[in-house]
């Protein structure tokens, strides 16, 4: 199951309609079907964190997305641009392992409306969402997608303006959501991983690195390589295995 957290209903009304989501009786505005949940958190970090925590404790969610609007620095982030977030504030880093059709950007999460400053992107929810989601999900299953609505001008966009903003991106947004595996599909083959660890005597840290490579392959529908070579020492074995996972363009 996939979760989308947004501050306002207007930001996700097109997704609610597209996926034919039905409203549920919940402490938040919440819409769902068997595969997808959309929850409306309201603005601020704390509201986003509470809504995210509520959904992740109540439903068997495997992927979480924070979708919504952000302000962008003039002459650097154009109104209508869409970004997948790769850094939040100074120290929070989503782990983007999946291929995607978006540009990437850092974002600053503020407690207040921002009307000036040297920020690439600014919102009021990303930090709360991300910190909450990381308590329940691995980093590679957490995403933040932001559409630039203004260049630090305080205003409430109407439906017509939002349609203009979102229309060019709807196909990519829906395709991205649909590309995420549902809860029945494993992100990695545990037996495949454990057999390699045992056969080539890998350490715990090497196992974790290799696990991320396998997750990346599965998320991007690459065929897992058939690895077979004569073992030597642990360092040699690990580097040799990683060669099998090199992506050839």
Image (cartoon, rainbow, N blue to C red):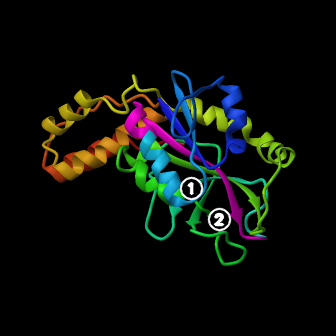
Quadrant location, the C terminus: top right
Let me know if residue 9 appears in the view: yes
Residues at discs 1 and 2 in contact (Cβ within 8 Å): yes
Against 108, residue 4 (above or below) is above
Q: Secondary structure at mark 2?
A: strand
- For residue 138, what is the image quadrant? top left
What separation in Å lies between label 1 and label 2 (alpha carbons)?
9 Å
Within 10 Å of disc 2 (Cα), the crowding (few <14, some 14-19, many 20+) is many
Q: Position of residue 86 (x, y in %)?
A: 53, 57
Which range is magenta?
55-74
Residue 237 is left or right of residue 41, and the answer is left
Which residue is pictured at 13% across the width and 49% down the height? Answer: 233
- Residue 85 is labelled as 1
Which residue is drawn at the image coordinates 38% and 50% (left, top)?
A: 134
- What is the residue that sits farthest to the right in this orientation? 160
Above-or-below relation of 76 to 81 = below
Q: Which one is in front, 61 or 87? A: 61
Residue 129 shows in this picture: no
Q: Secondary structure at mark 1?
A: strand
* Residue 55 image-quadrant placement: top left
Quadrant assignment, res 72: bottom right
x and y, in percent, of residue 32 in the image: 56, 27
Q: Is residue 227 above or below residue 169?
A: above
Which label's residue is closer to the chain start, 1 or 2? 1
Place of residue 5 in the rendered image (x, y in percent of width and height, measured from the top left): 56, 44
In depth, the one of 222 and 72 nearer the eye is 72
Residue at the disc numbered 2:
121
**Does the magenta-highlighted stretch encompass residue 245?**
no
Of residues 69 and 217, which is closer to you in this image? 69
């Amino acid at each position: 199951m996939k979760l989308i957290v947004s501050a306002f209903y207007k930001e996700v009304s097109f997704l609610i309609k597209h996926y034919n989501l039905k409203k549920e009786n919940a402490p938040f505005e919440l819409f769902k079907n068997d595969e997808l949940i959309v929850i409306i958190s309201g603005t601020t970090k704390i509201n986003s964190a509470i809504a995210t925590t509520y959904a992740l404790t109540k439903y068997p969610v495997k992927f979480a997305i924070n979708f919504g609007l952000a302000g962008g620095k003039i002459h650097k982030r154009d109104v209508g641009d869409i970004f997948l977030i790769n850094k939040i504030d100074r120290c929070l880093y989503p782990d983007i392992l999946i291929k995607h059709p978006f540009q990437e950007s850092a974002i600053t999460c503020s407690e207040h409306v921002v009307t000036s400053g040297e920020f690439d992107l600014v919102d009021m929810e990303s930090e709360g969402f991300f910190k909450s989601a990381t308590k329940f999900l691995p980093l590679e299953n957490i995403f933040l997608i932001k559409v630039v609505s203004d260049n630090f001008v305080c205003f409430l966009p109407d439906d017509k303006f939002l349609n203009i903003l979102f229309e060019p991106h709807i196909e990519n947004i829906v395709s991205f959501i649909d590309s995420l595996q549902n809860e029945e599909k494993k992100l990695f083959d545990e037996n495949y991983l454990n057999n390699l660890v045992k056969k080539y005597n890998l350490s715990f840290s090497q196992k974790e690195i290799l696990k991320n490579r396998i997750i990346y392959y599965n998320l991007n529908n690459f065929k897992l390589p058939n690895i077979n070579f004569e073992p030597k020492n642990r360092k040699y074995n690990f580097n040799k295995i990683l060669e099998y996972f090199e992506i050839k363009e």
